[in-house]
Image (cartoon, helix red, strand yellow):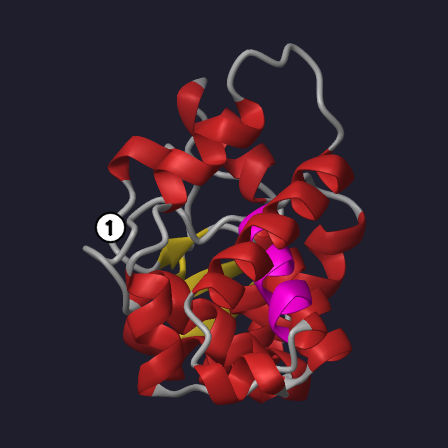
Amino acid sequence: MIVAPVEGGLYAIVDGQHRTTAAMLRGIEKVPCQVVQADRAQQAAAYAAVNGNITKTTPQQLFHAKLTAGNKEAQELAEACSAAGVEISRRNLILAKMKVGQTLAVRALSRCLCEYGRETLITALQCITETADGNAGFVRATIIEGLCEALHESSRRDAGEALLRAMDGFSFPDVWGEITDGRDQIFPATVRRLFVEKVIEHLKAHDTPSQQAA
């Protein structure tokens, strides 16, 4: 086990969490460890490096470890999410328990930030969190990617009241149900493409005459 000293005379576990927990459950009070000198950022960076390759660690945990370590990409993603009222949860949550803006889709968020850019990602997320009742539980990978793709294809990459007003009448639960209900198996790429088409169709129906002419 690898530990690093922290305030209060305690030690933070950098590697060996599972072995320590197993020892505690068996009533073992002491385990061998190696002490390393590392500040909080270094501890987080070491955790991300070690557990990302060895221990089954969730993408959310790795994201927060990288964020604490000052990773540039993690910071950029956190800032974009914050601008849209989105929170990457540290722990797994079932959809029914999610609050407005909570998500587990860190990989989809990262991909969209890289492929479509900060403004398009923020706009896509705002289409979820700032319409209707906030659409709790719908900041999902397929929906995030589908919205970014739809905004890119329809050249609506900038946030604006007109776009949010149009999306306010878009029912995420109903559209999701139309696409997925009654299908035993459907590929995520197919769901995303059908979702993109639904969004574009909805936006065209709410275009002004000048937008339609363009």
Q: Residue at (65%, 88%) from the top-left corner? A: 72
Residue 149 included in the magenta stretch of the image: yes
137 lies above or below 62: above
- Furthest residue in direction left, as rendered: 133
Relative side of 138 to 39, left or right: left
Q: From the top left corner, tell me how far across and down residue 156 is, in percent.
A: 57, 81
Q: From the top left corner, tell me how far across and down residue 213 is, in percent.
A: 60, 85
Residue 9 included in the magenta stretch of the image: no
126 lies above or below 69: above
155 lies above or below 134: below
Q: Could you tell me the amino acid type at mark 1?
A: Lys
Relative side of 5 to 55, left or right: left
Residue interval drawn in magenta: 142-151
| Main secondary-structure element of the magenta-colored stretch | helix
- Of residue 177 and residue 169, the one placed in the foreground of this image is 169
Q: Secondary structure at mark 1?
A: loop
Q: Residue at (67%, 45%) from the top-left corner? A: 192
Q: Quadrant of residue 83?
A: bottom left
Q: Quadrant of residue 34?
A: bottom right
Q: Residue at (22%, 57%) from the top-left corner? A: 132
- Of residue 205 and residue 158, the one placed in the foreground of this image is 205
Mark 1 highlights which residue?
99
